[in-house]
Amino acid sequence: MQLEDKQLMRLLSNSNPLIIHHWDADGVISATTLANYIGQGIDFESPPFKYNLDKNYLEILSLKSESHDIIIIVDLNLPSKVLAEISSITNKPVISIDHHTTNDIPKSLSIVYYNPAKNGDPEGLWPSAAHVVAILTGIYDPLLISSSIAGDLDNEAKNNRIFKKYMDEIGLDPEKDFDIPKDCAMQIWGAEALGKIDIIKNLPSVLAYGGIDPCAALMRDPVLTTLRNEAEEELNNLINKADTQLEKITDYFYAVMINGNGRLISKISRTLASKYPNRLIMVGYLAKSTNDASIYIRTKRNDINFSKISEKIKILGYQVGGKSQINNNVIGVEIKPESLSEAYSNIVEIIKKELA
C-alpha cells in the first residue's frame, strides 16, 4: 500500500513505533532522524546482518513490538515476503521507508511502502534513506544527513547535489570539509564492519536522546574509534590482496574471491571500482566474524544494464539488492556461506553472457 506524504506523516506523528534500521551509517542516521521527529519512547532494533530473517529473530521482534502499535523499517531492502512475515508475527502494520532500486513492491494492506527511488535514481536525487526521512519530516540535523550520504556514496558524495545542499546549509565546503561528515559516518562503519550489532542497534537512541551534538558524540566515543581503527587496518590489507588477485574474465569484467574477519566487502568493491572506473568489478567475500557471505558487483560505467543482471541473479533464488545511479551502479547478493563458491561461478557466467 502506498500513501501520500501528508497521510504518511500523520500516521508517523501519531505512532508509538518499534524502528528497525539497517546496520550501516545511513540506517542508524535514518532511525535517529525519524526518532527526532516522533519523539521519546521509541525502541530500536537492527537485524543480525541478514535480509532474510529467521524464525528466532522474528520471535524477538514479536516480543519487542508488544508495547508498540506500529513497526517502521528504514533503509532495509527487505523482500516483500519478509515485510509480510514481520507484520504477521507482530500483528502490527509495517511502514517501510527506503531508497534502494527494486521491483519487489509489497502489495499487502498491512504494509505501507515508501521509496521514491524504487525505479532507479540515475540523477542521485535520493542518495540516502536518511535524506528520504529528512524530506518527509522536515526535522533533521544537516550534518548527520550529510554523513549518511558520505557513508553511502563515499568520495562520490562530493559530486552529489543533495550532499552539496546539506553541506551548504551548515556552511561547509563539500570538498574541503568532506572529512567532517565522512569521519562521522566512519565511526559507525567500524562497529558495522566488525559485526558489533548490539552497538549498532543502540546508537539511534544515543544520538537522538543523548542531549549532545550527534556527530561530536560519535567522534568522542573511544569504543567506536577503536573499532574503526581495527577495521581500517584490515580493510587496507584486504584491498591490496583483492587488487593483486583480480582475475580478468572478459575485456573489462574482473572478479576476485577473498575472505577476512570484518564485514568489509562493500568498501573493498567500492575502492576497486573507483580505482578502475572503466571496469565491472565483482567481489565474492566471506566475513568470518559473522560467518556471512556475499557478492558485490560494482561499476562506474553507465552503459551496463544492471537491472537485467539483477533480475537474472534473482531467478537463481539469491537475495539481491542494489542501486542504479550515475557512476554508482551496485548489486549486492546475500549468499549462504557454504554456497559461496557455487554462487560466485554462477554469477560470473550470468555477467559474461550479459556482456557478450
Image: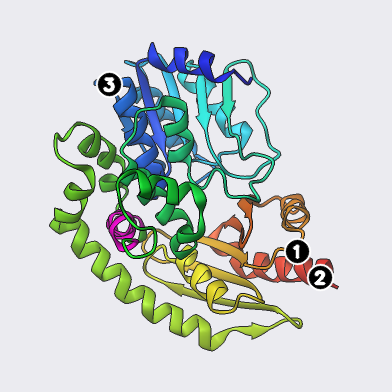
- Name which residue type carries label 2: Leu
> Could you tell me the amino acid type at mark 1?
Ile
Give the image location of residue 331, x and y in percent: 62, 57
Where does the magenta region start and end?
Answer: 178-192
Q: Residues within 10 Å of mark 1 (few under 14, many from 20)?
A: some
Disc 3 is placed on an element classified as loop
Q: Quadrant of the C terminus?
A: bottom right
Q: Is residue 180 magenta?
A: yes
Decide: few, some or many residues near mark 2? Use Cα within 10 Å; few <14, some 14-19, many ≥20: some
Q: Amino acid at mark 3?
A: Gly
Q: Secondary structure at mark 2?
A: helix
Total numbered circles? 3
- Colour pattern of the rendering: rainbow
Q: Main secondary structure of the magenta part?
A: helix
**Residue found 48% across the figure and 71% down from its top:** 268
Residue at 55% from the left image edge and 61% from the top image edge: 294
- Between the C-alphas of marks 1 and 2, the distance is 8 Å
Can residue 82 be seen from the camera position used here?
A: yes
Q: Which residue is mark 1?
A: 304
Mark 1 touching mark 2, by CB under 8 A?
yes
* Label whose residue precedes the other's in the sequence (1 or 2): 1
Q: Decide if residue 24 is on the left or right side of residue 243.
A: left
The numbered mark, 3 or 2, whose residue comes first in the sequence reads: 3
Which mark's residue is nearer the viewer, 3 or 2? Answer: 3
Could you tell me if the residues under marks 3 and 2 are in contact, i.e. CB atoms within 8 Å? no
* Separation (CA) of disc 3 from disc 1: 44 Å
